[in-house]
Image (tube, grey):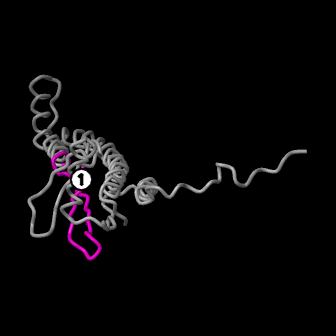
Amino acid sequence: MNKPADSTSTAHAPPSSDSAGGRAFSDAADTAPDPRRPIPPIRSPLSPSEAVDRLALLSKRGKLPGFLRHPVQGDTEKFQLLVFGNPYDRILLGTAAPSDAGSEIALECRLLRKMPAIVIAVMVFAVFPGVLVTHSMLSVWFSWYIWSEWITVAWYIPLCLIAVPALIKQYRNSERAAAIDLAKRVEQVLVATEGSS
């Protein structure tokens, strides 16, 4: 006779509570990969300077890419980290302010504008004056190309627009990658500052 299935098997075992905050962010990245969503503040028992000191130490070990400590403003400490979202990376801005229990660290993820600006500029120049350059080259190099500029525009612009869906897909993939990496960065901040969210 077959034995009944063990209801306490590892397949149904509850997940460990360790690093719950980081896993919560990882789950959110999998279900709704949007690095633009608000990030809950982190409450740490450490003072703002102690909390950022911990992050600086972690950075020296090569664990926090792009870590930069901003000049101190009163009792408030500010820092930033790099969030990878190849090819559209982000920065995670952190502000550690004093609180009754130690400090509260507010986090905000922002898109670095350099790569999107390059892509947009390339697309714009590909359309114009790209269409005029293409028409001129075809007219000079090929004697049989006798059509007007408007004919060139009619087939050249759709060719350029073919790249738009691929670029949109690339950006969405970047958002998913950034959300996963953001989860790792937030978990690192939680652990290093002994915080909770």
Task: Give the x, y percent position of residue 124.
Answer: 15, 46
Residue 188 in the image: above or below residue 37? above
Q: Identify which residue, 41 or 151, lies in the foreground.
A: 41
Image point 12% across, 44% down: which residue? 128
Residue 66 in the image: above or below residue 24? above
Q: Is residue 159 left or right of residue 141?
A: right
Residue type indicated by callout 1:
Leu
Is residue 89 at all visible to an observer of this figure?
Answer: no
Q: Please tell me how crowded label 1 is: few (under 14), some (14-19), or many (20+) other residues with Cα within 10 Å.
A: many
Task: Give the x, y percent position of residue 36.
Answer: 30, 60
Q: Quadrant of residue 60?
A: top left
- Magenta residues span 89-116
Q: How many marks?
A: 1
Q: Is residue 1 left or right of residue 180?
A: right
Image point 33% across, 42% down: which residue? 166
**Quick check: is 149 in the magenta stretch?**
no
- The quadrant in which the C terminus is found is bottom left
Task: Give the x, y percent position of residue 41.
Answer: 31, 67
Q: Quadrant of residue 96?
A: bottom left
Q: Quadrant of residue 70?
A: bottom left
**Quick check: is 105 in the magenta stretch?**
yes
Q: Identify which residue, 100 or 132, lies in the foreground.
A: 100
Residue 31 in the image: above or below residue 106? above
Task: Give the x, y percent position of residue 26.
Answer: 42, 54
Image point 36% across, 54% down: which residue? 187
Residue 94 in the image: above or below residue 66? below
Q: Which residue occupies the extreme right position in the image?
A: 1
Q: Secondary structure at mark 1?
A: helix
Q: Main secondary structure of the magenta part?
A: strand
Q: Disc 1 marks which residue?
A: 55
